[in-house]
Image: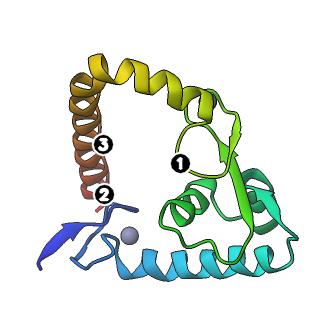
Amino acid sequence: MGLANCQQCGKLYMENEFGICVDCIRLQQEDEAKVGAYLRDVVDHASVAEIHEATGVKERVIMRMIRQGRIIGGVKVFYACETCGAPIANGRLCEKCNQNIVSQMAHLEINNSADEKLKMATRGVRMYSKEKGTK
Ligand SMILES: [Zn+2]
Ligand SMILES: [Zn+2]
């Protein structure tokens, strides 16, 4: 454990298991409470856009809650397929795109993951230098 850049706001913070600073954890908990309260009133399903409109919580935050399995109860939350935008309730892609990916995977897997890592690395650097500049 040492100093690291918050994955959310880029600020230096004491590293913890969440990967984000205390301020961001508190904000996230408030957001999650809002989403949770909204979903208690929902009958069986809601889309990420609907939750965002009703609670004001960023869609990115709602998506992370979904990915981490923190959406409570039997509510199905629909969000957009990352490729074609079709509504889906689990995974990252709709059925159709999943099939496409599986057939393309063999050729593309190595290149794609290298690209992703590069993108994440450059994003991290940008956030860090932005924060440094505001001092
Ligand atoms: Zn932060
Ligand atoms: Zn799709």
Cα–Cα gap, marks 1 and 2: 33 Å
Residue at 30% in and 57% down: 131
Amino acid type assigned to the residue bearing label 2 in the image: Glu
| Picture quarter with ligand 1 | bottom left
Judging by the rendered image, the residue that carries numbered circle 3 is 123
Q: Which mark is residue 113?
A: none
Position of residue 13 relative to residue 96, above or below, is below
**Residue 119 vs residue 113, the one in the foreground:** 113
Judging by the rendered image, the residue that carries numbered circle 1 is 91
Secondary structure under the numbered disc 1 in the rendered image: loop
Q: Are marks 3 and 1 in contact (CB under 8 Å)?
A: no
Precedes in sequence: disc 1 or disc 2: 1
Cα–Cα gap, marks 3 and 1: 24 Å
Q: Position of residue 92 (x, y in %)?
A: 52, 43
Amino acid type assigned to the residue bearing label 3 in the image: Arg
Q: Position of residue 29 (x, y in %)?
A: 55, 81
Q: Position of residue 78 (x, y in %)?
A: 71, 51
Judging by the rendered image, the residue that carries numbered circle 2 is 131
Q: Position of residue 11 (x, y in %)?
A: 30, 66
Precedes in sequence: disc 2 or disc 3: 3
User: Crowding at label 1, few (<14), some or many (≥20) Cα neighbours within 10 Å?
Assistant: few
Position of residue 72 relative to residue 51, above or below, is below
Secondary structure under the numbered disc 3 in the rendered image: helix
Cα–Cα gap, marks 2 and 3: 13 Å
Precedes in sequence: disc 3 or disc 1: 1
